[in-house]
Amino acid sequence: MVRTYKRKTNRSDISEENIMAAVEDVLQGRLSIRTAATTYNLTKSTLGKRLKKIKRRRSENPGRDHDAPDRQDSDDPISFASPFQSKYSSQQVFTSAQEEQLAKYFIQSSKMNYGLTYTQAQKLAYDYAKKLNVKYPPSWNNSLSARKDWMKSFMKRYPILSLRKAENTSMARVSAFNETNVKEFFDNLQRALEKYKITPERIYNLDETGVATVLDVPKVIAKTGTKQVGQAVSAERGELVTFCAIISGVGNTIPPVYVFPRAKFKDVFMKAAPTGSLGLANKSGSGWMTSILFLDLIKHIQKHTKCTKFKTYLKQAFNDWLVNHPGRRVSIYEIAQLTEKAYQKAFTLANICSGFRKTGIVPFDRGIFKEDDFVAASVTDTRDPVATDALSTSVLRHQKKIDWKKKKIAKQKKKQVKHNLFDNVEQQANDSDDSGEKVSYAHDESDCLSEMDRENSEEEFMQDVEAIIDRESGMPNIKVGDFLLVKYCTKKTQKYYEGEVEEIVDGKYFMNFLRKTGTGFTLPQVPDKDLIELEQVELKLPKPRTSETTARSSSIKRFQVDYRAYNVN
C-alpha cells in the first residue's frame, strides 16, 4: 500500500458542508437533485450517490429517530447518514471520535512515563477494535495487532503525536515529583527567602556531569545506502573527568571545577581551560567528586562569589578536534581545552536565566508546575506525607519500643520493687517487736526512698518519652531547653548523641550537643551545634541530674536512661 501518495488533481476536493446542505434541501423537498447540485457546485452523480446511502440507512433502521445526531461530536441533523466526517474516511476502522480517544490515551500514557511503542499501540488498536466490535481488516487477526499501514496513517492524521526517544526516569524520581512535595519545597524556599532576605544574585545552582575522553559522535555525511558508517574516536572506552558548572539566579557564572582521575594534580591538566577554573585530583583514580574535594569546591565558590546544551556542543568540539588531528587520541590533557569551547557556547545569560525561570526559583513562582506535570506520580500515589498522622516511620517504631518498656517497668514495679520493699520493712518491724528493741529504720527508709525514687524517675522518663508527640494534636511536643537523644545514620551503623534544644526553626531543631564523659555528659569547650529533623529524634530525655559538690561535677549531667540499646557517643 502506498503510504505517501499525493493527489495530482483537486477535482475531488468537494466541500463536505456543501454536500450536507444540498442533501438537506433535497430531503426537505425544497430543491430537486439537479437544482441542488447546480446551486452548491456539485455533480448530479455525487449528490445522487450520497442520497442513496442516506435512504438505504433509513430503510435499514426504520425505527430510528432520524432527526437526532448519530454522533456526540456532530451538530448536523443528518450526520447519521455516514458515521464519518468525510467520505474519504469511509474505509477507516474507527470513527474520528474513537481515534481521538486513542490519541488522548497515548498522550496520557506518555505523561505518566509509561509511553507506548508502535508495537504496543498496534496491539492496543486491535483490542480496541475487538471490544467495539467494529469492522477491521482480516489481516489483523493473523498478528493479533493492527498493521503498520494503519499505524502510519493514524500518525499522519494526528500530527500532535510523534515517535520520541524516551529518557530513563527512575521510579524514585517519578514518585517523588508530586504536588505535595513540590508545595513543601516552595514553602521552605519562600520562608528562606523571606527570613534571610536572599536576593537572586545569591542563589546558585551546581551540577556535575561526567566528561569521558570518548563521546558519541555526531551525524556525518556519507553515501546513501551505506550499511555502516565509521567515525574515528580515541578508544573503545575512555577515562572519566568530572565537570562541575556553577551558575547564579541573575545569569552569572563561576568558573567551572574539574576532577581528574589522578593521584596528584598537574597544572598541565588545565591547559586552555576557562579562566579561573579549579582543577582537582581524585586519589582513588576514579574521577568522581568526593566529600573532601567538595569542600575545595565550596571554597572556590566563596572565592568567586561576586544545564544546558553543553553536551551537544561538547560532542561537536570532540569531533572537530579529531578531524583536525587525525591519528591522535583525546586524553584527559585535552579535556579542559575542549570543554572551554562548549562552555562558552552553552552557558549564556539567556540559558542560565531560563533554567532558573523554568523551575520557578528566580523569579519565585510556586505555580510554575501545573496539574498535568504531576500525572506521572499518580501511578505510585501513596499516603499524603503531610496527613493528620504526622508520626514518621521512625517515631512510630520507637513509640512501640516505648510502649513495650512501659509495660515491662510496670510489671517490675508490681512484682519486685514494691513487694520486696514492703516485705523487708514488715520483716524488720516483726523482728523489733520480738526483741522488744526499738529499731531505727533510717537505712531501710533511705533504701525504700531510693527504690521509689528510681520508680518515679522511670515514670518521669516514660512520660517525657511519650511527650515527643502530642496525642491529641499529633504534633511534636518539643520545646526549647529540652534534652533529646538524636540519631545519625552512617553507611553501616547508627550513632546517637545527646543534646539540648536551643532554637526551633520551621519545624527543625537547633541542637547544642553534649560530649560523653566517664560518669555522664558535659558541654565541650568548642560548641558542637547542628540543625536536625524530627525524624532524627530518638527519645526525649528526662531532666538531667547534677551534683553540686564541686564546680566540675556540677557541669556533668546524668540522665536516668538505659543506654544499652543505643550506640551513644
Image (cartoon, grey):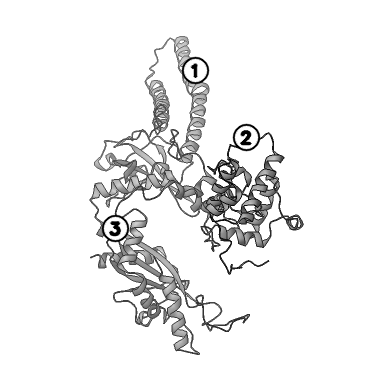
Residue that label 1 marks: 423
Say whether residue 56 is left or right of residue 73: right
Q: Which amino acid type corresponds to the residue marked 2 in the rendered image? A: Asp
Of badges 2 and 1, the one in the foreground is 2
Q: Which mark is residue 193?
A: none
Against 403, residue 275 (above or below) is below
Q: Quadrant of the N terminus?
A: bottom right
| Label 3 or label 2, whichever comes before in sequence order | 2
Say few, some or many: other residues with alpha carbon within 10 Å of mark 1 (under 14 / 14 to 19 / 20 or more).
Answer: few
User: Which residue is disc 3 drawn over?
Assistant: 203
Amino acid at circle 3: Ile
Labelled pair 1, 3 in contact (Cβ < 8 Å):
no
In depth, the one of 152 and 414 nearer the eye is: 152
Question: Residue at 44% of width from left, 84% of height from top?
Answer: 321
* C-alpha span from label 2 to label 1: 99 Å
Separation of residues labelled 3 and 2 (CA atoms): 67 Å
| Left or right of 533 in this view: 109 | right
Query: Could you tell me if residue 282 is visible in this image?
Result: no
The x, y position of residue 148, in whole percent, is 66, 62
* SS under mark 3: loop
Q: Are marks 3 and 2 in contact (CB under 8 Å)?
A: no
User: Residue 387 location in percent, x, y?
Assistant: 44, 35
State the residue position of label 2. Answer: 65
The foreground one among 229 and 459 is 229
For marks 1 and 3, give the one nearer the viewer.
Answer: 3
Determine the secondary structure under disc 2.
loop
* Amino acid under disc 1: Asp
